[in-house]
C-alpha cells in the first residue's frame, strides 16, 4: 500500500510540474524541474526514479507544448533542435541532490542556488558552441553576449528553484515529522 501511495505522489509531481510549465503567461524560466531534480536526488532511494522525476515532467510539458504549437495555440514549439542537451543537463542537476549528505535548510538553499547557476553556465555555453539561439560569433565577446542575453532566465530560474525547493522539501519535512509523531504515539 505504501508503494502505491509513493507512485501516486510521484505521478502527481510529474503531472503538476509539467502542467505548471505550460501555463500561459508564466515567466519563461520559472519552472519546477530543477527543484524536482534536486529533490529527487536527495530524497528518492531508487536513483533511477530520482532522474526520472524531472525528466518525465519536462518531457510531458514539452509534448504538451508541441501539441499546442501544432494546434496553432502557441508560437513555442515543444521539441526543437539541441533540446537533448537540456535533458542531459537536467539529469546532471540530479547529482546535486544525490550529493546532499544531510537534508537541511542550508544544503537545500545551496543546492537551489547551485543548480540554476550550473544549468545557466552549461546551457548557455552549449547554445554558444552550437551557434544556436542567439547566432553570436564564436569569440570571447560572443560567449559573453550569450551569457548576458541569458541573464533574465537565470534570475527567474534562481527564484523558481528556491521557491519550488522550499515547497518540495518543506512538504517532505512535514510528512517526515508527521510520520515520526505517529510512530511515537503507536510505541507509547
Image (cartoon, rainbow, N blue to C red):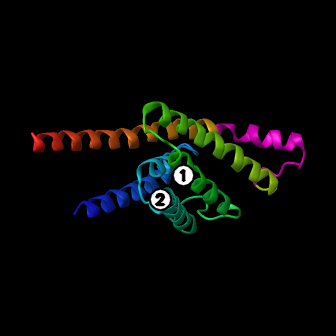
What secondary structure is marked by label 1?
Answer: helix
Q: Could you say which is closer to the camera, residue 41 or residue 155?
A: 41
The span picked out in magenta is 133-152
Residue at 70 percent of width and 41 percent of height: 150
Residue contact at pointers 1 and 2, CB within 8 angstroms:
yes
Q: Is residue 81 left or right of residue 2?
A: right
Q: Is residue 184 left or right of residue 27?
A: left
The percent position of residue 136, horizontal first and vertical second, equals: 84, 48
N-term-proximal mark, 1 vs 2:
2
In terms of image quadrants, where is residue 28? top right
Q: In the picture, which quadrant includes the C terminus? A: top left
Asked if residue 138 lies in the magenta stretch, the reply is yes
Residue labelled with disc 2: 47
Q: Could you say which is closer to the camera, residue 25 or residue 78?
A: 78
- Residue density around tag 2, few if under 14, some if 14–19, many if 20 or more, within 10 Å: some
The percent position of residue 113, horizontal first and vertical second, equals: 57, 36
The label number, if any, that marks residue 94 in the structure image: 1
Name the magenta segment's main secondary structure.
Answer: helix
Residue at 53 percent of width and 38 percent of height: 112
Eye-nearest disc, 1 or 2? 2
- Residue density around tag 1, few if under 14, some if 14–19, many if 20 or more, within 10 Å: many
Q: Could you say which is closer to the camera, residue 76 or residue 96?
A: 96
What secondary structure is marked by label 2?
Answer: helix
Residue at 70 percent of width and 48 percent of height: 122
The percent position of residue 141, horizontal first and vertical second, equals: 88, 39
Q: Is residue 25 visible?
A: no
Q: Is residue 186 left or right of residue 176?
A: left
Amino acid at each position: 500500500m505504501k508503494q502505491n501511495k509513493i507512485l501516486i505522489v510521484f505521478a502527481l509531481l510529474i503531472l503538476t510540474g509539467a502542467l505548471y510549465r505550460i501555463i500561459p503567461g508564466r515567466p519563461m524560466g520559472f519552472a519546477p524541474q530543477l527543484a524536482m531534480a534536486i529533490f529527487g536526488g536527495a530524497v528518492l532511494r531508487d536513483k533511477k526514479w530520482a532522474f526520472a522525476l524531472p525528466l518525465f515532467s519536462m518531457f510531458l510539458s514539452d509534448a504538451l507544448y508541441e501539441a499546442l504549437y501544432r494546434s496553432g495555440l502557441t508560437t513555442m514549439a515543444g521539441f526543437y533542435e539541441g533540446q537533448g542537451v537540456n535533458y542531459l543537463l537536467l539529469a546532471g542537476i540530479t547529482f546535486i541532490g544525490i550529493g546532499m549528505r544531510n537534508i537541511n535548510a542550508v544544503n537545500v538553499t545551496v543546492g537551489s542556488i547551485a543548480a540554476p547557476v550550473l544549468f545557466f553556465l552549461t546551457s548557455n555555453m552549449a547554445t554558444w558552441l552550437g551557434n544556436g539561439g542567439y547566432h553570436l560569433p564564436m569569440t570571447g565577446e560572443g560567449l559573453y553576449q550569450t551569457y548576458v542575453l541569458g541573464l533574465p532566465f537565470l534570475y527567474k530560474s534562481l527564484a523558481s528553484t528556491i521557491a519550488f525547493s522550499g515547497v518540495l522539501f518543506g512538504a517532505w519535512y512535514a510528512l517526515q515529522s508527521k510520520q515520526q509523531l505517529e510512530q511515537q504515539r503507536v510505541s507509547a
